[in-house]
Amino acid sequence: MVGHRFSKEEMNEMLLYHAKKQKSKAIGALIVGPIVTGFGIYLSNKDPYTISQSGSSITIRENKTVVIGKVIGTTGILTTLTSIPLFILAGKAKREAKLVLSDQSTSLLRSRIAVPSLGILIKM
């Protein structure tokens, strides 16, 4: 489809589909993240050492479950935080879809305004 130009309606449908897909991913990450974090916290609260006795000798071993629990808990937190940019992308795609149907330009969403005297660049 090289050189194919989409109509406003096709572009709107494509952007709304993209927004819905991103929002579904964000909701999934928002639901799964705390569950994984909770499981990780549960595992990391286990006794960090295992004591076993055989005859007259006592063996103390480090419990690997605690370390695994911390890794799983951290993964859950990162998964939850991943939902934030996904929600932002979904909202941006939805706003752009609304602009496509209106007669306004979508270039405002991607424009940059430089203010050299202040040394800043505003990205929209």
Image (tube, grey):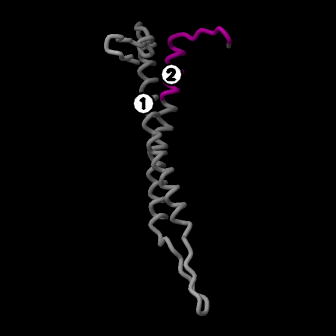
Segment colored magenta: 2-19
Query: How far apart, in angstroms, are the residues tagged by discs 2 and 1?
Result: 14 Å
* Mark toward the start of the polypeptide (2 vs 1): 2
Name the residue type under label 1: Ile
Q: Quadrant for residue 81, please give it.
A: top left
Q: Which residue is label 2 attached to?
A: 15
* Foreground disc of the pair 2, 1: 1
Residue 31: % across, % down: 45, 47
At 42% across and 16% down in the image, what residue appears? 109
Q: Is residue 5 above or below residue 21?
A: above
Q: Secondary structure at mark 1?
A: helix
Q: Report helix, strand or loop for mark 2.
A: helix
Q: Residue at x 48, y 50 (%)?
A: 76
Q: Mark 2: which amino acid? A: Leu
Find residue 23 and report its horizontal and vertical position in percent: 46, 34
Please state, as top left, top right, bottom left or bottom right, where the C terminus lies in the image.
top left
Report the quarter where the N terminus lies: top right
Q: Residues within 10 Å of mark 1 (few under 14, many from 20)?
A: some
- View extreme (left): residue: 118
**Picture coordinates of residue 18, whole percent (x, y):** 52, 27
Q: Which residue is mark 1?
A: 88
Crowdedness near tag 2: few (<14), some (14–19) or many (≥20) residues, C-alpha within 10 Å: many
Q: Nearer the viewer, residue 89 or 69?
A: 69
Residue name at image x 50 percent, y 11 percent: 8
Point out the residue furthest to the right here: 1
* The stretch drawn in magenta includes residue 4: yes
